[in-house]
Each structure stands twice: as C-alpha cells, then as structure tokens.
Amino acid sequence: MDSKHAIMVEDLVKTYPPDVHAVKGISFQVPPGQIFGFLGPNGAGKTTTVSMLTTLLRPTKGRAVVGGIDVAEEPRRVRRAIGLVFQDSTADGELTGRENMEVAAGLFGMSSAECRGRIDELLASMDLKEAAGRRVKGYSGGMKRRLELAVSLVHTPEVLFLDEPTIGLDPQGRAGFWRYISQMRKEQEVTVFMTTHYLDEVENLADRVSIIDHGKIIASGSNDALKERVGGDEIEVRVGKGTPVLTTALSAVPTVREVKREGDLYRVKCPRGEAVLSSLVKACDLPGASIEGIRVLRPSLDRVFLELTGKAYREEGYDEGRAAASSAFHRRRQGGG
C-alpha cells in the first residue's frame, strides 16, 4: 500500500440480502497522523463503514486497507494493528484499571516484562496512576473513558478508531478526553478515525471530514473547505427604521453571493466577510439609510450538515448496533478469528 495513506478505501460496497444497499461504492484516504472525522445521520452507512474497516463486517465489493493491511484478506492482522474505543463501556468493572490493561496486553501477545513499562506510561499520561489499583466499577465516567483509551493504545496501534467515544460524558469529561487525544497525537504518529454526535469536537480537532448520506459520501474536505461550499461567511447588517431597501445595493458588492432581507436585518453571504465589510458599509451610504449594527458570522459545521443532508445533526441515543459491534470486536480479538 502507498505509505502516504494510513487508511485507503476504494469503491467500498456493503449489501445486505435481499436488496439493502448500506454502502454504495465509497472512496477516501487518510494520511498518517491525521484526525479524520466521519459524519452521517442514522441509517447513512456510517456504522456499516466503521464495521468494515474494523473487520466486524466483510465488504461485499471494493477494497479497504488499514495500516497497510487489507481488511478482507487479513482481518486478524488488522485487529492487532488498530485500537478501538466504542461509545459503550468495554472495561471490566470487577477488575482494577491495571488488570484491565494487563488483560488487553496479554490478548495482543505482550509479555509481562514487555507491557509493564507501557502500562505505567499510559496510566500516568491518562492521570490514572493513583487509581490503577482500584476496581473500575468505582471509576467516574471520564475515568472509564480514559482507561478505555489507554487500553486501546497498549499495543501501540497505527490507527485508532473512536466511535462515539464521548457519548454520555459531561462537558468537562468530553474536554478532558480530547485533551488526552491531542496530547497523544503530539507524542505519537497515530492516525485517528473518529465519529461523533458533537460537531464541536470535529470542528476543533479534525484535519479532514467526510459526510456520508444514503450510503454515499456527499462531501469531503477540511472544515474550512466544507464551510465554503455552503456560501462561506454570513454578514448580518441591521439598519435603522425608515432605511430604504438595500438589497440591490448590497448584492452589487463584489464577491457577494446572496442577500436575504428579514425586515430591518439583511443576511449577506460571501466567501470572506472581513474583506468586504467596508464595501458593504459604503453600499449602505444612501439618502435616508443608517446602519445600527454589522457583524460577521462564520458558518458552522452544523449548518453545512443541514444544507448538505437536509437534516439537523443532533445527539442521538444509545445504538444497540454499536453495542453488538463492540462485543463482537472484543470476542474476535480474543479468539483471533
């Protein structure tokens, strides 16, 4: 495989009998060391795609390579080359934090001597050193998430899959979890494939994003590039009472793409808002016109998602399919099949 790609997907298809097309020939690549956000509404094919990349489902057609390994040809090797954190907890509450990590290291064939230093290092980096000897059932939600992240990293994987990892955490817990991800990324050349229902996480962390809907990828690019696709910035111009209609004057300003009037408020779309502010103010310099306020609004990823899919991107509940996928992954990793 081309070393430029930690994940390479080519025309990947998944069809269920008798005629359900869950994934319809998608393609994308993720360079090493990047954080890749994969977004989609329920039923779009997102979970099916993640399941194929993590060997839980076999593709119907196409090809997927993770960490240089074909997922269909060598699934056992793929499972040993990746880390995975699901939305549902996979830690054994009756074991201590350290014991959970020792079990995981043993499943990957690491000797006690080999894994001892690695476990100590991860427990310290996740701020779990003092709690390492306590049973996990007494951990807070944030501590469990950090432990599960540490478990997923014990064998030093090339690619880390995070499938809704912060569902159920409070804002402080979410911020803490991603702080550790950012720290880990600086220290190691690990590639992160993330799905989430919190779009701020994608906006703040992802280098590149793909949006899947109805089994097809409908948009890919950086956060800024995706925002440009829906018209770039929006400038709100609020005018005083008695101001003549300014739609034509504002529309004539270079680079302005669209002007919508809502009473005394005008919404102006353009690629770079700050660059046209002075021109918009000049366009409003007409007899009887007055500006009471003007501000630039950067488009949100939520707006991008809404305009591309016609659906709001909102937090969803517990997904039984992911719970089953989580159990299947760990059973297969232990069994090696």
Image (spheres, rainbow, N blue to C red):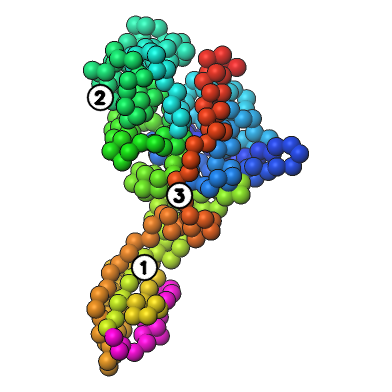
Which mark's residue is nearer the viewer, 3 or 2? 3
Residue 237 appears left or right of 193: left
* Distance between mark 3 and mark 2 Cα atoms: 31 Å
In the rendered view, tell whether residue 218 sits above or below residue 238: above
Q: Residue at x 64, y 30 (%)?
A: 58
- In depth, the one of 318 and 252 nearer the eye is 318
Please state which amino acid type lies under the numbered disc 1. Glu
Relative image position of residue 11 (x, y in whole percent): 63, 42
Region rendered in magenta: 241-260
Please state which amino acid type lies under the numbered disc 3. Arg
Query: Which residue of the protein is positioned furthest toward the right in this rendering?
Result: 18
Q: Earlier in the sequence, mark 1 or mark 3?
A: 1
10 Å neighbourhood of mark 2: few (<14), some, or many (≥20)? some
In the rendered view, tell whether residue 155 sits above or below residue 234: above
Q: Residue at x 62, y 27 (%)?
A: 72
Please state which amino acid type lies under the numbered disc 2. Asp
Q: Which mark is residue 234?
A: 1
Q: Residue at x 48, y 58 (%)?
A: 306
10 Å neighbourhood of mark 3: few (<14), some, or many (≥20)? few
Circle 3 is placed at which residue position? 314
Q: Is residue 26 visible?
A: no
Q: Which mark is residue 127?
A: 2
Q: Classify residue 331 by image quadrant.
A: top right
- In depth, the one of 97 and 270 nearer the eye is 97
Q: Is residue 252 magenta?
A: yes
Which mark's residue is nearer the viewer, 1 or 2? 2
Q: Quadrant of the C terminus?
A: top right
Q: Classify residue 177 by image quadrant.
A: top left
- In depth, the one of 178 and 226 nearer the eye is 178
